[in-house]
Image: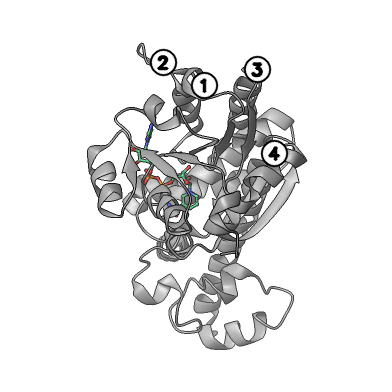
Amino acid sequence: MSETTSQQLPSVAFLGLGHMGGPMAVNLVKAGVDVTAFDVVPAATDAAREQGLAVAATPEDAVRQAQVVITMFPSGRHVIDAYTGVDGAEGLLAAAPAGATFLDCSTINISEAQEASGLAREKGFTAADAPVSGGVVGATAGTLAFMVGGEPEVFERVRPLLEIMGGRVVHCGGNGMGQAAKICNNMILGVSMVAVSEAFVLAEKLGLEHQAMFDVVSNASGQCWALTTNCPVPGPVPMSPANKDYEPGFAGALMSKDLNLATTALDETGATAPMGRLAAELYDQFVKDGHAGMDFSGIITTLREGSEESSGQG
Ligand code: NAD
């Protein structure tokens, strides 16, 4: 977290107090930011109150005095619906005061992020997307990485808030480019975890010890985060989820979600990415097989089972 003083900090409406949004909003309050919070789920608002957050009765009430409106929702549909209002609701864009900045920190489709920021800008507001990496641990510790898409002056306006909630804040370009950076990174991560897992399963079949493979590859050209930090086999990296029966970490459901955002972006742009598409299929199946809550490195168990079935047939 940075040394920013509360006098310089804009007031915030924080909507979406789930696994990520709850601790992020708490960190803003601890830094002296004036935060009014809201969530549609009463359990989330109760937990937020217990943590010292002021909770509004409606989403519109949360934003009426806000200089920055932060959303942390599951999907792009949630963001656009909250902005515009559904089922007779007024919507955040109608309720926010002139001059407000809409800052969406959810991980959503690039096209939806651009649609949401476009809706805000049409109403005379400024807007940016700022998806995060770092998970619940980073959200709680205030060490998230933020990838920001928006005009430079909007980035400067929200930067002090992001520096409270995060350890690294990168301006990636115009609206949607924060999501683009996040989606490209996670496509690499999904593909590389499958590649590392396949190599370990092949090593097992060949009789090569996990530790020996790790000692070579972690110092060779196969070195990557999926191997050296989130190693999918227990032993070589004691803190990796594989040592705790694949307790996440980064859940398979979230990797599947992010790879589906990548395939949407591939469809929309026409970019060729056979590996990214295959990783998306593998993680879809991983979730369908009941592993949504398992760390994404648990894909190795599915690959191992698959190899056992093929050797049975061979
Ligand atoms: P979550 O489901 O725990 O929280 C989302 C919250 O939004 C819920 O409490 C829900 O009730 C609330 N919500 C939905 N619609 C709302 C509305 N209209 N008004 C107010 N509240 C509303 O999800 P999460 O794990 O906190 O993730 C949030 C976002 O962050 C997602 O887009 C996710 O992909 C992204 N993300 C999550 C992680 C992680 O490790 N959990 C890591 C990086 C990014």
Q: Is mark 4 within 8 Å of ligand 1?
A: no
Q: CA distance from mark 1 to mark 3?
A: 10 Å
SS under mark 3: helix
Against 42, residue 218 (above or below) is: below
Query: Measuring 69% from the left and 34% from the top, which residue is drawn there?
Result: 175
Mark closest to the chain's N terminus, 3 or 2: 2
Residue contact at pointers 3 and 2, CB within 8 angstroms: no
SS of the residue at dot 4?
helix
- Dot 4 or dot 1: first in sequence order is 1
Residue 122: which numbered mark, if any? 3
The residue sitting at the top extreme is 88
Q: Nearer the viewer, residue 219 or 229?
A: 229
When the figure is inspected, residue 128 is found, relative to residue 243, above or below; the finding is above
Res 90 label: 2
Residue 222 % position (x, y):
69, 73
Which numbered disc covers residue 154? 4
Q: Earlier in the sequence, mark 1 or mark 3?
A: 1
Distance in Å between CA atoms under marks 4 and 1: 17 Å
Q: Quadrant of ligand 1?
A: top left
Which residue type does callout 4 highlight? Val
Q: Residue furthest front?
A: 7
SS assignment at label 1 = helix
Label 2 near label 1: C-beta < 8 Å? Answer: no
Kindly check if marks 4 and 2 are in contact, taking CB atoms under 8 A apart as contact: no
Disc 3 residue type (three-letter): Glu
